[in-house]
Image (tube, rainbow, N blue to C red):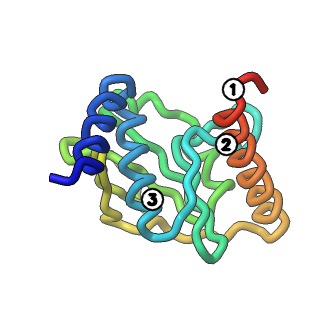
Amino acid sequence: MCSRFVHNRRMDRISDQLMQPGQLLARGVCRHLSSHDFACIIEFVPERGRRVDVMALGPKGEIWVVECKSSRADFIGDVKWQGYLQWCDRYFWAVDEAFPVDLLPAGTGLILADAYNAEVIRMGQETRLAGARRAALTRKFARHAAWRLQRLLDPRL
């Protein structure tokens, strides 16, 4: 077995122990979307008072929001999800294979995920963002990603 592969699996196991179930789902979602040329940010704040689990920016400028639900109780307790619809072209739920998917609202997308990968099962209904909102959100996405990278490189910022 390649030493790089062994190292990557070891690092995954270490990070798995430090992450919450929803964060593990988000990681799998991001890995999958990245394989389709989407750039992803976990725990993105499009406006004060709102925090989406995953915001993904596609190769054609499309913006997807993915909310990761690790249990029935986690889903039932989410009363803000409809407020996220105005911040994306498509909205998805990401759940694991044990989640009761019949709870999820019609018209929303469905992604089956685990900590390592995911699969889009149902595309979310497309509702294109207005041009001005898309431009502002894309700028915010880019600035946020740049700030995160800069803080990673210089934690004293």
Percent position of residue 36, x then y: 45, 70
Q: Which mark is residue 31?
A: none
Q: Earlier in the sequence, mark 2 or mark 3?
A: 3
Answer few, some or many: residues within 10 Å of disc 1's Cα (few below 14, many 20 plus, some between 14 and 19): few
Kindly report which numbered mark, 3 or 1, lies closer to the viewer in this rendering: 1
Residue identified by numbered label 1: 155
Q: Mark 3 highlights which residue?
A: 108
State the quadrant of the C terminus.
Answer: top right
N-terminal of the pair, mark 1 or mark 2, is 2
Seen at 41% across and 45% down, the residue is 27
When the figure is inspected, residue 8 is found, relative to residue 87, above or below; the finding is above
Asked whether, in this view, residue 40 is left or right of residue 44, the answer is left
Q: Quadrant of residue 45?
A: top right
What residue do we see at 32% from left, 56% from top?
A: 118
| Residue 100 seen in the figure | no
The residue under label 2 is 149
Q: Is residue 14 left or right of residue 145?
A: left
Amino acid type shown at disc 3: Thr
Q: Residue furthest front?
A: 3
Q: CA distance from mark 2 to mark 3?
A: 31 Å
Query: What percent of the width, then of the height, locates residue 128?
Result: 66, 71
Residues 109 and 30: in front is 30
Residue type at tag 2: Leu
Judging from the image, what secondary structure is the residue with disc 3 in?
A: loop
